[in-house]
């Protein structure tokens, strides 16, 4: 009975998380890297909850089989908690730098503590370093038991710092769950580390994952499924938050639209029109980084927020997009080219209203569009 009272929180958390995992597989887009990272993290936590509960059940059970099982379980538990925190760090990195692949050197550098911990935990199967399983199959912490906790919390704190540094790039409703996810496991691990016998870290992490699930569901309502850009309403809220925080804010804005979408739809069909929109936005996203937010204004028109006060940077972005579109056109087997028209400028809150600024760059975009020659399909 005492064992059941000790592990009941793990069992309840595992049951809730199991339901969330099932819903995630049905509701979330598994082609999205963020959703896949979330699902991987959820599975790791679910297994961790069950393994931790099982370790309590077999503790003090005097049998060679139980002793070997206990060693394996504790190796997995101590090795997997930093892995989970590392996955969360990658999640945050991908969230803010969606189009930027992690450099191999950075990936290896961030994984060094993870590799060190895995080696240390494996050695603990033979030497009393992190833990030991003594006489009567009794689990005991050893002098280095704090290392996995420190590495896991280090990853979580680093991911939280990454969120705080990039605070301006996200909405308030996104900021809170991204920070809280790290907060609960850190508190849980600290309590579990200080109070021997308390099981809280894995259940606290499961609770955090329920928060992240609501965040991902909200993200699906925020992102246009075809172009993978924000909806207009989300972008407007994002700009409103910036201006409420600082009415004299300065930032760059690019308006662009896909040329001749109506002609592509009429001549080649709406499926080809959808392809043109999807491909054009994919090309645009490849030149963006964590300073950019792209939103679908409606139809074939888009906004791009750029965290800069230099108009030259906007010009460079536009030229890179033009260059990449031309590269696509030269190698594409489609019967139509992809071109975009642009208007851009630096908004300065102390000199103009956002509405008048938007009207100005909107007019610039249409002037750019009207100066172009008539549409000519590929031969």
Image (cartoon, grey):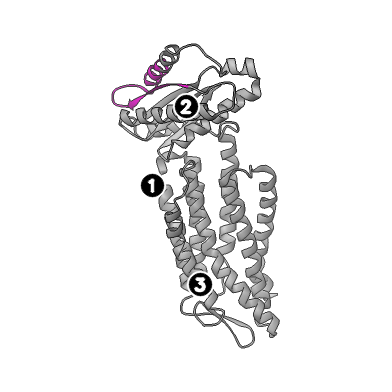
Disc number lying in front (3 or 1): 3
Q: Of callouts 1 and 2, which one flags the residue occurring earlier in the amino acid sequence?
A: 1
- Residue 326: which disc? 2
Check disc 1 and report its element: helix, strand or loop. Answer: helix
Question: Residue at left 59%, top 73%?
Answer: 74
Image quadrant where residue 104 sits: bottom left
Question: Residue at left 56%, top 26%?
Answer: 277
- Residue 165: which disc? 1
- Name the side, left or right, on which 282 lies relative to 73: left
Label 3 crowd (10 A; few <14 / some 14-19 / many >=20): few
Magenta-colored stretch includes residue 374: no
- Name the side, left or right, on which 32 lies relative to 157: right
Check disc 3 and report its element: helix, strand or loop. Answer: helix
Where in the figure is residue 124, as x and y percent of width and height?
53, 78
Q: What stretch is highlighted in magenta?
A: 340-364
Image quadrant where residue 55 sits: bottom right
Magenta-colored stretch includes residue 361: yes
Report the residue marked by disc 3. 119
Label 1 crowd (10 A; few <14 / some 14-19 / many >=20): few
Check disc 2 and report its element: helix, strand or loop. Answer: helix
Where in the figure is residue 206, as x and y percent of width and height?
60, 57
Question: Residue at left 64%, top 83%?
Answer: 137
Disc number lying in front (1 or 2): 2
Question: Residue at left 41%, top 16%?
Answer: 368
Q: Is residue 299 above or below residue 283?
A: above
Residue 240 in sight here? no
Q: How far apart are the alpha carbons under marks 2 and 3?
A: 50 Å
Where in the figure is residue 115, as x and y percent of width and height?
49, 66
């Amino acid at each position: 009975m005492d064992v059941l009272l000790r592990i009941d929180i793990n069992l309840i958390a595992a049951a809730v998380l199991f339901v969330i995992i099932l819903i995630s597989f049905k509701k979330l887009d598994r082609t999205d890297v963020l959703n896949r990272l979330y699902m991987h993290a959820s599975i790791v936590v679910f297994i961790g909850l069950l393994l931790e509960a099982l370790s309590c059940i077999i503790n003090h059970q005097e049998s060679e089989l139980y002793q070997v099982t206990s060693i394996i379980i504790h190796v997995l538990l101590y090795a997997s908690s930093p892995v989970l925190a590392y996955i969360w760090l990658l999640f945050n990195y991908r969230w803010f730098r969606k189009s930027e692949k992690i450099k191999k050197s950075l990936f290896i550098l961030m994984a060094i503590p993870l590799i060190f911990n895995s080696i240390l935990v494996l050695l603990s199967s033979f030497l009393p370093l992190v833990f030991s399983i003594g006489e009567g199959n009794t689990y005991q912490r050893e002098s280095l038991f704090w290392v996995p906790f420190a590495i896991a919390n280090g990853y979580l704190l680093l991911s939280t710092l990454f969120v705080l540094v990039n605070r301006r790039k996200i909405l308030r409703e996104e900021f809170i769950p991204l920070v809280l996810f790290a907060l609960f496991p850190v508190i849980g691990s600290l309590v579990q580390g200080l109070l021997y016998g308390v099981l809280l870290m894995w259940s606290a992490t499961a609770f955090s994952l329920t928060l992240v699930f609501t965040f991902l569901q909200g993200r699906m309502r925020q992102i246009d499924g075809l172009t993978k850009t924000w909806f207009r309403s989300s972008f407007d809220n994002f700009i409103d938050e910036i201006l409420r925080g600082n009415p004299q804010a300065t930032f760059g804005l690019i308006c662009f639209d896909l040329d001749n979408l109506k002609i592509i739809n009429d001549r080649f069909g709406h499926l080809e029109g959808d392809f043109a929109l999807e491909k054009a936005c994919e090309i645009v996203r490849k030149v963006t980084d964590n300073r950019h937010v792209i939103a679908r204004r409606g139809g074939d028109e888009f906004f791009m927020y750029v965290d800069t006060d230099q108009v030259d940077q906007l010009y460079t972005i536009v030229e890179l997009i033009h260059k990449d579109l031309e590269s696509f056109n030269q190698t594409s087997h489609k019967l139509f080219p992809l071109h975009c028209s642009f208007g851009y400028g630096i908004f300065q809150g102390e000199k103009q209203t956002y509405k008048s600024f938007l009207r100005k760059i909107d007019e610039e975009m249409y002037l750019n569009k009207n100066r172009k020659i008539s549409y000519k399909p590929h031969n």
